[in-house]
Image (cartoon, rainbow, N blue to C red):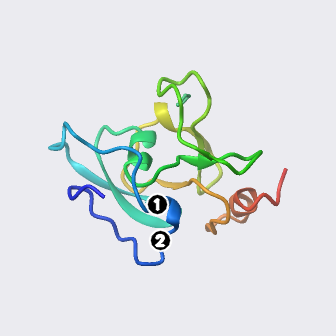
């Protein structure tokens, strides 16, 4: 993980988060912020898209709701629809065209327990 983005992940962090997909090489002086990814508090920089912020933490932006396969976005410009995520309160977010904000809470994978039973059920594949 880049040294400019400290994480609070412990030794029990999911394997999907072991290495980031993206590495920041420029604009490292923007103001930092914190958000919650699958219940873990992580860092990003002001002006990052949600896609950038998530892929700075792990190799996937979500699991496919159909196959369960990892997805990381494709076009990065809002055209392919490969980067839809959910907030913990169930709102769908297109990660490549949504700016990450302080305290934002998002879910990227199955099996994540959130404070919202409906989102947890969706994340677990228990709802249509
Ligand atoms: S990465 Fe293609 S729509 Fe977001």
Residue 100, position as x, y percentages in the image:
40, 44
- Element on which disc 1 rests: helix
- Number of numbered labels in the structure image: 2
- Residue found at the very far left of the displayed protein: 29
Nearest to the observer: residue 111 or residue 70: 70
Q: Mark 1 Cα within 10 Å, few/some/many (few <14, many 20+)?
A: some
Q: Which residue is mark 2?
A: 13
Indicate the position of residue 77 as horizontal and vertical percent values.
48, 23
Q: Left of 88 or right of it: where is 122?
A: right
> Badge 1 is on which residue?
17
Q: Is residue 122 above or below residue 41?
A: above
Crowding at label 2, few (<14), some or many (≥20) Cα neighbours within 10 Å? few
Please give the name of the residue rendered at 33% of the width and 65% of the height, measured from the top-left corner. 7
For residue 18, above or below residue 27: below
Query: In the rendering, at what x and y percent does residue 28 appear?
Result: 18, 43
The quarter of the image that holds ligand 1 is: top right
Element type where label 2 sits in the image: loop
Q: Nearer the viewer, residue 120 or 23?
A: 23
Q: Are marks 2 and 1 in contact (CB under 8 Å)?
A: yes
Residue pictured at 51% horizontal, 38% vertical = 95
Q: Which residue appears farthest toward the right when viewing the image?
A: 128
- Label 1 near ligand 1 (CB < 8 Å): no
From the top left corner, tell me how far across and down residue 8 is, in percent: 35, 71
Which residue sits at x=39%, y=71%?
Answer: 9
Quarter of the picture containing the N terminus is bottom left
- Looking at the image, residue 127 sits to the left or right of residue 24; the answer is right
């Amino acid at each position: 993980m880049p040294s400019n983005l400290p994480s609070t992940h412990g030794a029990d962090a999911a394997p999907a988060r072991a290495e980031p997909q993206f590495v920041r090489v420029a604009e490292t002086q923007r103001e930092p912020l914190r958000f919650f990814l699958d219940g873990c508090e992580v860092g990003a920089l002001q002006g990052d898209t949600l896609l950038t912020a998530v892929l700075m933490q792990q190799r996937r932006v979500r699991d496919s709701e159909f196959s369960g396969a990892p997805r990381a976005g494709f076009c990065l410009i809002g055209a392919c629809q490969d980067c839809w995520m959910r907030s913990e309160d169930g709102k769908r977010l297109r990660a490549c065209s949504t700016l990450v904000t302080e305290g934002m809470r998002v879910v990227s994978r199955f099996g994540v327990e959130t404070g919202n039973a409906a989102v947890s059920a969706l994340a677990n594949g228990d709802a249509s």
